[in-house]
């Protein structure tokens, strides 16, 4: 009986050893796979493009805000001038 158990354990050990060796080879292939390296480079480029797009969006928003502030200031001056004119016209009556 002990011999049968020992033989079974020996067979299981050999099978597991083969599986572990195969897994190690696959891992080595994955690490050295140039397609994976190209995928990483492609991902980095895509991230760089997205970063640039976000920066461009921020820049456009800022430029639009500056433009709107200038228009607002111009309109405020116009309203003030009109208030002064209205006050002057009222005082003339």
Image (spheres, grey):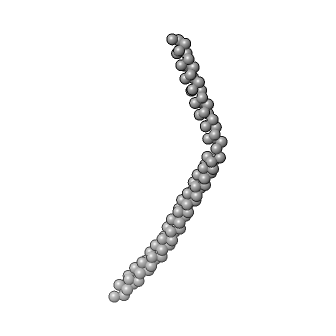
Q: Nearer the viewer, residue 64 or 88?
A: 64
Question: At which x and y percent is residue 84?
Answer: 41, 80
Q: Which residue appears at 55% of the width and 23% of the height?
A: 12
Q: Which residue appears at 63% of the width and 50% of the height?
A: 38
Question: At which x and y percent is residue 9?
Answer: 54, 19
**As drawn, is 77 to the left or to the right of 20?**
left
Q: Residue furthest left?
A: 93
Q: Residue furthest bottom?
A: 93
Q: Which residue appears at 41% of the width and 81% of the height?
A: 82
Q: Where is 29 relative to 87, above or below?
A: above
**As drawn, is 55 to the left or to the right of 86?**
right
Question: At which x and y percent is residue 39?
Answer: 60, 50
Can you tell which quarter of the image residue 33 is in?
top right
Q: Which residue appears at 65% of the width and 42% of the height?
A: 32
Which quadrant holds the C terminus? bottom left
Instruction: Let me know if residue 1 appears in the view.
Output: yes
Instruction: Let me know if residue 73 appears in the view.
Output: no
Q: Nearer the viewer, residue 75 or 48?
A: 48
Question: At which x and y percent is residue 85?
Answer: 41, 83
Q: Nearer the viewer, residue 35 or 9?
A: 9
**As drawn, is 66 to the left or to the right of 24?**
left
Q: How many marks?
A: 0
Can you tell which quarter of the image residue 19 is in?
top right
């Amino acid at each position: 009986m002990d011999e049968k158990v020992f033989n079974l354990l020996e067979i299981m050990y050999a099978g597991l050893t083969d599986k572990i060796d195969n897994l190690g080879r696959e891992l080595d292939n994955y690490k050295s796979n140039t397609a994976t390296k190209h995928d990483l480079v492609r991902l980095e480029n895509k991230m760089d493009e997205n970063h640039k797009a976000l920066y461009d969006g921020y820049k456009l928003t800022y430029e639009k805000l500056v433009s709107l502030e200038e228009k607002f200031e111009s309109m405020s001056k116009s309203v003030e001038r009109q208030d002064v004119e209205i006050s002057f016209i009222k005082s003339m009556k």
